Amino acid sequence: EDKDVREAAVSALGSIGSDTAVIPLAQSLKDESAMVRYRAVESLGRIGGSDAVDALVGALKDGGWVGLPTGNKNQPNEKVWVRQRAIEALAEVGDARAVAPITEALNDKQEPVRQAAQRALQRLGAGSAG
């Protein structure tokens, strides 16, 4: 399926890890498939750098989510928000410019997103928020 090809492509770009991949990955954040956007966020987090941070901050507005396997066949897939993964990726990159937009996510309507924001701020050294 076409979305599977796009998902594989954004994952491969992240594995290559080149700064030149940031532009096509940022464009993939507009893909209709939440899984493609999720994988693009992961890849941007792996690559890092200033342009990746800009793209990831933009992904904090993404309303989509994906169902990821929990590793336990008796449990349903875990619902993970694209913006939740963007917060985690920003924390991994470690750019101080992410603190303000992540702080805004402390007011997100989804509890997992708020929790990710709190963990990210702690990781970024912005104190214990909330």
Image (cartoon, helix red, strand yellow):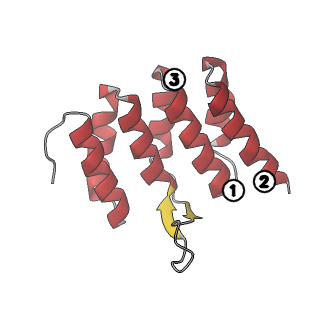
Residue 121 or residue 59, whichever sits in front: 121
Per the image, the residue denoted by label 3 is 51
Return the disc, 3 or 1, that comes first in the chain's sequence: 1
Which residue type does callout 3 highlight? Asp
Verify CB contact (< 8 Å) between mark 3 and mark 1: no
Q: Residues within 10 Å of mark 3 (few under 14, many from 20)?
A: some
**Placement of the C terminus among the 4 image quadrants:** bottom left
* Looking at the image, residue 71 lies above or below residue 74: above
Q: Is residue 8 left or right of residue 43?
A: right
| Three-letter code for the amino acid on which mark 1 is drawn | Ser
Q: Kindly report the distance in space between the C-alpha atoms of the residues bearing marks 1 and 2.
A: 7 Å
> Helix, strand, or loop for circle 3?
helix
Name the N-terminal-most of marks 2 and 3: 2
Kind of residue at disc 2: Lys
Q: Secondary structure at mark 1?
A: loop
Question: Foreground: 15 or 57?
Answer: 15
**Residue 7 visible to the viewer:** yes
Secondary element under disc 2, as helix, strand or loop, is helix
The quadrant in which the N terminus is found is bottom right
Q: Position of residue 38 (x, y in %)?
A: 58, 50
Residue 97 sits in which quadrant?
top left
The picture places residue 28, in percent across and down from the top left corner, at 67, 41
Q: Disc 1, disc 2: CB below 8 Å?
A: yes
Marks 2, 3: nearer the viewer: 2
Q: Which residue is mark 1?
A: 33
In the rendered image, residue 57, in percent from the top left (x then y), is placed at 44, 38
**Which label was assigned to residue 3?**
2
Mark 1 Cα shell of 10 Å, populated few (<14), some (14-19), many (≥20): some
Answer yes or no: is residue 109 visible.
Answer: no
